[in-house]
Image (cartoon, rainbow, N blue to C red):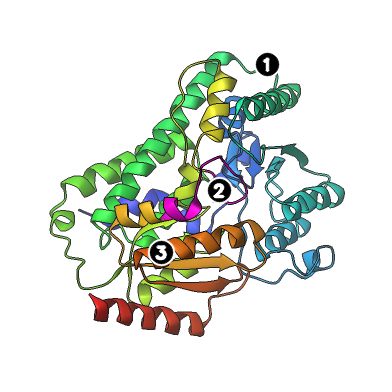
Amino acid sequence: MDIQSLMAPFSFAEKEPYAKAMEAAASGKPVAGYLCSYAPLELLHAAGYLPVRVFSRIGDTHHADELLQTFSCSYARSVLDRALKKEWPFLDIVLFSHTCDTMQNVADLWRAHRGDAEVLIVSVPTQTDGALAEKYYGAELARVRRLLEEKTGPIAEARIEEALALFQQQRNAMEQLYALRARYPKVLTGARVMQIALAAQLMDREAHLAALHALLSAVESAEEAASDDSAALPKVFVAGSMCSPPAFIDLIEEAGCHIVGDDLCVSHRAFYSADAEDGSTLEVLTRRSLHRDPCPAFHRTGWHPGHALLARVRAAGADGVIFLLTQFCDPMAFDYVPMMKALEEAGIPAITLSVEQNQEPSEQLRTRVSAFSEMLQGSA
């Protein structure tokens, strides 16, 4: 199995993440930026847009620092700074999902200081269960559809149905990838899976799906995967808030761990979806979004973040958990407490790394992960 060749279609995601978007824009295809996994990507796709995720990057945020409060997270500061520096001139529209007050502030500042890309906001109900939540969000999606149709013309129901099928196929393939990663972490390393996940949010979905199917087929049948002896290194599950720089995943693996699962906003959590097939296209999209496992910014009756994390850690066969917590991410900070309590009660070791997404991970973090790896190996 030539893993490097199979990874080639996704290789742009780390060093030139917006290369595909620029190519699409140059060919005349409109490009839509989005900042949250709750964005109605199927509507954007059906309207003819290439949806691309707006990521942070390592570097200074001087321009954004002049406008945002000091307690704003590094993701918010970084994406606003990139917008102010006009690093995404190819974006026709930018779609925000209302997740927290800081991101609402970023949306307002983006609209005020960048007139070349229209800002759209879709409000996801904070409490995602119940008939009222579905009615409200369904109305929001209908409003977004009308706004898009004002720009691109009528969006046929058949186009939305095709988009619903395509994106569900991609989510299913990504779930297969994460299941294989838990079995063969030496072949499907954390760095490779992160690269595939980032590419999935940055390129044409049909092209990504075809390349992913080829890789999955090769891994499942390869002798290298079947003989993957990963027992020498401890297996860890990575949890936390928004954290897109691959450097943090690289650090964990370089410090002596195999990553067998994650619950990161830009990786596995970006592909969560609920089963919903009955009803109109917007009803299906509404239920797929609201009935999924909620991210820390949202809530559902009976949902316990600690119990959910514990189930994922056990399913992945992880020996321990590494939290990547972006400073000043209040929604994740609230979920972090019951998550840690659940792990502690289950006897699963965990460490927490404080992350600034616009800064390279420090050697201190590497030392801590190395010590954690040694501790896990010693207790095996």
- Residue topped by disc 3: 343
Labels 1 & 2 near each other (Cβ < 8 A): no
Q: Crowdedness of circle 3 by 10 Å Cα count: few (<14), some, many (20+)?
A: some
Q: Give the magenta part as a residue range.
A: 294-309
Q: What secondary structure is the magenta-colored segment mainly?
A: loop
Marks 1 and 3, the one that precedes in the sequence: 1
Percent x, y of residue 62: 77, 70
- For the C terminus, give its image quadrant: bottom left
- Residue topped by disc 1: 154
Task: Mark yes or no: residue 157 visible.
Answer: yes
Amino acid carrying mark 2 in the image: Cys
Percent x, y of residue 167: 47, 32
> Is 180 drawn above or below residue 66 in the view shown?
above
Marks 1 and 2, the one that precedes in the sequence: 1
Q: For the point 78% across and 64% down, which residue is it?
A: 64
Q: For the point 75% across and 37% down, which residue is it?
A: 120
Give me the C-alpha separation between circle 2 and circle 3. 18 Å
Q: Secondary structure at mark 2?
A: loop
Give me the C-alpha separation between circle 1 and circle 2. 32 Å
- Residue topped by disc 2: 295
